[in-house]
Every structure is written in C-alpha cells, then in structure tokens.
Amino acid sequence: MNEPLRIGVAGLGTVGAGVVRLLQQNADMITKRAGRPIHVVAVNARDKEKARGFSFEDIEWNDDAASLASHRDIEVFVELIGGDEGVAKVAVEKAIQSGKHVVTANKALLAIHGHAMAEAAETAAVTLRFEAAVAGGIPVVKALTESLAGDRIKQVYGVMNGTCNYILTKMESTGKDYQDIFDEARDLGYLEADPKLDVGGIDAGHKLALLASIAFGNRVDFRGMDIEGIEQITFEDIQLAGDMGYRIKLLGIARMSERGLEQRTQPCLVPKDSPPGWIENATNIVVLEGEETGQVFLQGAGAGQGPTSTAVLGDLIDIARGRRISTFGQAASSLTKATPVQDGRDVAYYVRLRILDEPGALAKIAAAFGDAGVSIHRLRQYGRRIDDVSATVLIVTYQTSRQKIKHSLTAVRQSGMTIKPIVSIRIEDV
Amino acid sequence: MNEPLRIGVAGLGTVGAGVVRLLQQNADMITKRAGRPIHVVAVNARDKEKARGFSFEDIEWNDDAASLASHRDIEVFVELIGGDEGVAKVAVEKAIQSGKHVVTANKALLAIHGHAMAEAAETAAVTLRFEAAVAGGIPVVKALTESLAGDRIKQVYGVMNGTCNYILTKMESTGKDYQDIFDEARDLGYLEADPKLDVGGIDAGHKLALLASIAFGNRVDFRGMDIEGIEQITFEDIQLAGDMGYRIKLLGIARMSERGLEQRTQPCLVPKDSPPGWIENATNIVVLEGEETGQVFLQGAGAGQGPTSTAVLGDLIDIARGRRISTFGQAASSLTKATPVQDGRDVAYYVRLRILDEPGALAKIAAAFGDAGVSIHRLRQYGRRIDDVSATVLIVTYQTSRQKIKHSLTAVRQSGMTIKPIVSIRIEDV
C-alpha cells in the first residue's frame, strides 16, 4: 500500500466532524479511489469533550490551531474554523509558511485575503483548495477551474445562500413577512452567529467573488462588489412579482465586459420559469456560461454536513492523487486587478409605489419616468382600499441604466404624489 | 515559459476541428490556465482538403491515425474518430502502447473496451480521459470521479441523448408521430450515421455504462445493461402520460444494490415537475446521488462543437497541469466484476391497452392484474369512438416487480378482451 496522506483538521463543527467521520466510515473506498489512505493525524477544536460522531482513536488532540497548522507530521491542513480574521487566518498563513497544503471551506477568509494567500501558496509551492467554500456539495469550483478552463466565461450567476432562499421561499408559501420567517429561521439554527452575513448578502457575495476570480482571471475583489441583502423584501413584493411571472431571489451575478468587472449580489426578480426561479428552500444553483459551452447548470445542496464534508474530501482526494493547481486556476502573479463596474448591464426594473388618490397623480408619475428617459413596459394600478388614501402602482420598466432609474425615482419622490417608501428591484432575465 | 504539451488530433469532424480551433483562438488564456502552451503537432482526418475553421500552419498532416498515435513528438493522442472498432480502436491501443496519454470523446469504444484499455493505460503509466464522451459540455465525468470521490454513490441517472430528447419533445409539441419527427431529425443531421445508436438507446447506454463504472467501481459492463429505444413511443402515449402528470423521457439509470448492478436505458414516465421532466430538446441532464451529498443536478448542452470541444480541452488542460488519474477513478485491477441485476427496483407501470366494448371486459382486465399480484393505482377508460369496437384504457399500477407486470400483461392478452398491442412503460419517480 502507498504512503498515507497525513492531515490535520482544525474546527470540528458540523463540517469538520463530518470530514473525520467520513474518512473513517468510507476509509476503504477512499483509499481505493485516492490510491492511498488519508489519515487524520491530529485535530483541533474549542471543546475537547463534545461527542462528534467519530472515533478519536489514534488521533492526536491539539489545543492550538496554529500549532496544528505547522505540525511536523501533517502534509495537509484542513481549516474548518471559519471567519475572515483571527484564528483561521493565522492558522492558514502558518500552514502555508510551513509548506502544508491547505483545504478550507472558509469563503470569508478567501474573499478578503484570497489573493495574498494564493501568492503565499505559490511561493511555498503548496496547493490551497476551497471547493467546500462555494455552494456546499455542488462541485462548482472544480467545474469552473478545470472543466471549463478551455472556454472564455461570459458570466457566472446563481443562488448561493440557502438561508436567504429558505426565507424567501417560506415568505412566499406562508404569506408571512420577512421578520417572522427570519425569527423562525434563527430558531431553527439556520442563521450564522452574525445573521447579517446571510441576510445581508455578504456570504453569497463572498462565494461569488471567488467564482469571479476563477472565471475572469482577476484578483478576488469582494470589496468591488455591489451587495444588498433581503431585509427589505416584503411579502407584498413577492406576491406582486409573482403576479407578473417572477420570483424574488438573492441572485449573485458576475460578468466581465470591456469596461470591467460587474459583480453584484442583490435581490432580483427572475422569471418563475428559469433555473434560478425554480430553486426552493435551501437548495443552491450556479450557472456557468461560457462562449463555447453555453450554459451549464449545477444544482444541489448548498450546505449541511454531508454535502460540505464531501466537497472537502474531494479536495483531499485530489491532493492525495497528486493534484496541484493554482488557487484561482492560474498563477497568482498573472491575475489582473479588476476594474469594478458599478453600473453594469442595463436591465428592466420592478418599481412598486403608492400614489395618492388625486387627479393627475398617475400622469405625474408616468411623466417622471419619461422625463428621466425610462420607458414603462407594464403598469398596473391596484384598486385602493376603502380606508386608504393611496393606491399601489406596479411598474415594470424597459431595460435601462441604474443612473436613469435613480433619476426617475428621485423625480417620482419629488412629485409629491407618492407616500411610503418606493421599492425598486432589478429584473434579471436569466 | 514552460515546455508546451504536444498533442496529436485524429478526427477533424465537428469536435476535432473545434478542439484545434479553440486551442488556436484561446491560446493565451489556455497557456495561462494550463501553466504552459498546448501545441497541436499533427492531425489526421479522412479528407485533407476540407476547410475546418482553423489554421494548418505549423501543423503536420498525417494520413494514418495509428501512426499519428505513436508519433514521436506527441505526448497526448486525442481520438475524435468515433466507433467501437476499426481505426479508433487500433489507434488508441497504439497510443497507449507507445506511452502516450489519450483523450477521447468515444463513448462506444470505452463502453465496450474500456476495461481492457484502462488496464493497458495502467500498465503503460499513461492517463486515459473521456469527459467529452458523456453529456458533451456537462462536466459529469469529473464531478463523479473527483468531486464526489469521498461519497458512496447511490444512483446515477439522467437524460443523456439529445437526439432522443429532441424527438420526444418535438412529438409532444407538434402532435406528430415518431416516424415524422424521426425523418425531420434525420434531415436536420441530428442523427448518427446509424440512427439505431441514438433512437435505439445505445448511445445513452454507452454513456451510462461509463458513469456506472466510476460510481460503483465495477468494470464497465455495457452488455449487462437493459436497453430499449424510443421507436415504439407514440404521440398517444406522450399525450396520455401528460394527462397523468408525466413526460416520457429516454432515461438512463444505474443503481447498485446488494443483489448487484442495475443498469437500464429505457423510455420512462417521469414526473413533469422533476429535473428530468423539465429537460427540453437536445439538453442533457445528469443527476448524481450520493449518500452524503444528496442529489447533484448537472444540466447543459449534451452535444455540439463548443460544449464537446471544451470538454476535450478540459482533459487536455488537466494533463498539461500534471494531472494523472485512473481511467475509472481507481486502479483498473481494483474494479470488480458487476453482477447484472435484470429485475431491479420495483416501480409503478403505465399500461395502455384497448379493450373490446363487451360486458365484463374491464372486470376481466382488472382481474388479470389482481391475479398476478399487481395493484391498480389509477385507471381511466376513455370514451369509445362511434366507429370503433374498442376503448382505450389507461392503467397506472402501484410499484411492482417486472416479473409480476409481465405475468399480468400475459393474462390480459389471454383474456381475449383486448386488441392491438399493449403498451407498458416504467414510471421512475425520480
């Protein structure tokens, strides 16, 4: 039998415990497929006493992640601690400096420090893999880095935060408003310790930034991304969008044009009858669109122990098989600095507003759009309730620039014909 | 700059010409991603004079595929000739013996001779890759061999022949019968020279056999597969299935159980509201279901120059990056001989028959099912046309064995209460 691949695992939460459990449970199969055994030499976590569903026999306990990272008997350091600063960062840096390969599920860390770490890995001649960081069990990092490496990528988009999609789907099916479902999701343990990471779109943004780097050969640029969360989405918007044939999804989109890199993670209206429109609950979907390949859709579980641990194992088996690849699919030194494009492609907009029940109100609103150069594609005025002084108006514009929609909405506000906040959401005809 | 990877390409049809064109067109990008250039040293095809959309400058012409296969200046032989015997087989064997890596899109060759070739490749210490052989631009071979290598696969299924799916979709949308759409597809050039490969389910069967080998670690066993084509499917069945909430798809399914390996490629009823049920026209979908990962859906273009060439490039870039992997994901010597299971999992059946308009006819039919131990889940008798002596009866059974459904259909026939052939189609609730 060939020499085992010796690894250290830091972080024994859901994913870390799953990785060790599966390495034990599927040992024979993994040995066959990897060509050699994968041995867990040492682990590290905060709480030594907790039951984790695997056997600690022959596994050394280590109190300090950074010291595990440079453990003389390991070749691969598996970082499943999480967070873009602190222990995880220190340990990964230490591992790379110590000449260890690194496998991580830490999207935040790589979205912020990925380029520096890719450079460090290159200098140290180690490999840094992160399949589990993006969309759990969906093999999208590998598909993009390896399978589509011969194609020029036009865009990458998808629904990559299961918690947001769960909340939006639940709002739709129950008719409850955001805060109610948010509370339910929190009680069910679906939310990160800092829920803003999920519902603020940050987690999905981290993932998209990683994919964009591979797709377009730019240094990962999370800060250049336009990010908006789902906190402002109401059941009314979900319902009205539904009436028009759309669903609201937290969509991540990255596109490269001559002007630069457009990266956005925002609630969008997508056609009900489109792959992102189909996705229910915590499922994720990623669409890779290449000039030659056309669209490849990858769909599956975006989180959870089984899927995410399997993704970590895939990276480990790759390393055991002798696989070495640049972090973002090409030499770190060859990655270019992206020019962030804020305005991006023209799209249609969904606009919801409440107009006062006064003669000429609708005319003034329509004029505000026209004057700003925004054409109205569809407009619906809903009947005013008897006790109300205003009526809901729903507008779907033709494709226009963000600048123009902004001007039109300012003019609408200034018309004095509307009350309550005006809601505008991009429509992505993906 | 690093040493180029030098390749020879045999077969310059749609895919071969695409591979050379893309290597020229995307040369800079591919060099960056692969870490070194990929040079086409020599090519071979039947017709030297044909225009193929790429430059022949610096490319040697070779009249004989087998001699190209052992060309001293190449490291990789790319076989895009096709066919499970003849030139393609001889050339691939020659390449392996000569210590060349092989990349091929030839599903027929590998489905029949894959195990012997995997053994030969192992002996010669070369790598034999075939992403383009299964589902064109969908990176399913890699996903299964690498990404899900840590998981125990429960089943693999999908719609993997675009031509069949095109015909079935067109029958549905136009109301025309099989032969009409078949003729249209042939005129459009959608069919293989031997159309039986497509409509007989053989091509889809070849692909499934390759995936099954990777998924379950068995020697590729095309001959152990149950194969049935779409030639017998009528518009009436498509319509009646539609009435019951199903679509008819040529579905490939491979499952491993304690009894052995079940592999089938057959027309099946699948729920309209399921991923295989959504797939239109020439699109392919493959679903990988792992114990831990759950279901991963991969969807995209199953054929065409762009997608298939990109798949070949993915394999080439892997090799350029230093990737070596066993053909079916583990040492050929460790692949087991599968025990083919003909009967497989119990499923529900769709049965269409025409019963004579005689008192007691339906009772006798129902008794025939009951006596064979098959329970009827849903039954519809359609009104008899005025000039007809028989009426259509549609039956959906509960899950049952193939043996029992066979017995019940024999009894139905023997009842003397039916005319015209009896149609029975498996229902796969995927």
Image (cartoon, coloured by chain):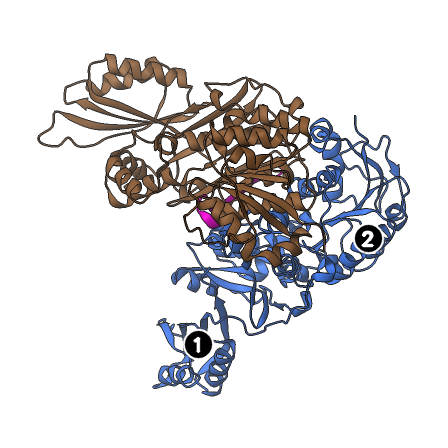
Chain colours: A brown, B blue
Work out whether B241 lies above or below A178.
Answer: below
Q: Nearer the viewer, residue B269 or B263?
A: B263
Q: Going 64% across and 55% down the picture, which residue do you hit?
A: A31
Q: Which quarter of the figure is the N terminus of chain B placed in?
A: top right
Output the chain of dot 2.
Answer: B
Residue corresponding to mark 2? B92
The region drawn magenta spans: A292-306
Amino acid at the residue labelled 2:
Val
Q: Is residue A223 above or below residue B275?
A: above
Residue A368, percent across and down? 29, 15
Q: Quadrant of residue B159?
A: bottom right
Q: Does residue A302 show up magenta in the picture?
A: yes
Q: Position of residue B14 (x, y in %)?
A: 72, 43
Q: Position of residue B397 (x, y in %)?
A: 41, 73
Q: Nearer the viewer, residue B231 or B44?
A: B44
Disc 2 from disc 1: Cα separation: 52 Å
Q: Which residue is mark 1?
A: B354
In which quarter of the view is residue A396 placed? top left
- The correct choice, above or below, for A414 with respect to B277 in the image is above
